[in-house]
Amino acid sequence: MRLFIGIFPPKEILDSFVEIQNGLDQFKNYIRFTKKENIHITVKYLGDDISKDSLNGIIKDVRKVTNKTEAFDIRLKSIRYGFPGRRWPRIMYISIYRSLELNTILSKINDKLNCYNDIHKEKYDLSSMYHFTLARSKKGLTREVILDIRKRIEKIDLWDGFHVNKLGLISSKLDNNGPLYKNIESFSLEEFLNLIYFLLRNIYDKIYSYLFLMVRS
């Protein structure tokens, strides 16, 4: 079983990504757009051949991490065509700002899952490469088209970001039409600190309003 742990954006962010894709429709002969339902961040790729025996243990161990992890915000950074230093672009993607919370989750998950022999072990630190893939290059791409696409996406404004309150354990099957994803398990993140912030903010607003009225009277 091919599995990964991922983050899928909320509807309003996803709709903005699709709007970007629609605005680049003239390049559809050169790039293949990611299906709306498949746009995600891969937090950790687990492997191509995860056994059913390992699956139950993986779910339990990842939940041990997420049950003690606060929800957090992701900030969108930029849209790019091709990774820096690569001569020929393979994908168009939206990068995010480095996230301490996301890196901490990955580190804890790695520690929990290190005992599974069928889980893929990363050779490099990929925490600086989190991204949403919007499109992949097709054959026939020319340098002129690459420059045209890059010039076009320079003018695109992105949303600031979004709130992450869950991770998904996703299975992936590859066919001629692209990957087919299925959510195997969802892992909710804690909202305790966000609740405390909301309550304190509410108290502050009420005190401020009361003092404002007192001064005016």
Image (cartoon, grey):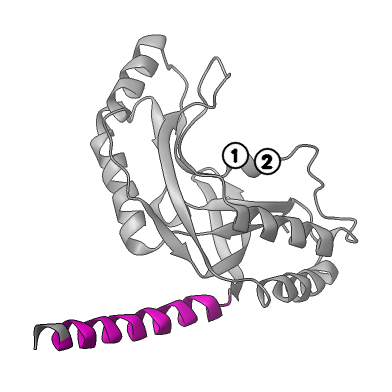
Residue at 26% in and 41% down: 22
- Residue found 39% across the figure and 53% down from its top: 36
Q: Residue at x 27, y 86 (%)?
A: 206
Q: Nearer the viewer, residue 74 or 9?
A: 74
In this rendering, the answer to whether 124 lies above or below 195 is: above
Q: Is residue 3 visible?
A: no
Inspect the image, locate mark 2, and give the three-letter code of the amino acid beneath it. Leu
| Quadrant where the image shows the N terminus | bottom right
> Residue 69, how many percent across, how many down?
64, 71
The residue at which mark 1 appears reads as: 129
Q: Nearer the viewer, residue 110 or 100?
A: 100
Quarter of the rendering occupied by the C terminus: bottom left
Q: Are marks 2 and 1 in contact (CB under 8 Å)?
A: yes
Q: Secondary structure at mark 2?
A: loop
Q: Identify the residue under disc 2.
A: 126
Name the one closer to the observer, 38 or 150. Answer: 150
Q: x%, y% of residue 130?
A: 57, 44
Residue 209 counted in the magenta span? yes
User: Left or right of 80: which side holds 100?
Assistant: right
Residue at image position (59%, 66%) is 168
- Along the line of sight, the residue nearer the viewer: 72 or 14: 72
Q: Which residues are magenta?
A: 190-214
Q: Position of residue 88 (x, y in %)?
A: 53, 17
Q: Which amino acid lies under the numbered mark 1 shown in the image of this protein?
A: Met
Secondary structure, mark 1, is helix
Please tell me whether residue 117 belongs to the stretch shown in magenta.
Answer: no
Report the number of numbered marks: 2
Q: Measure how far apart labels 2 and 1 are at the Cα level.
A: 5 Å
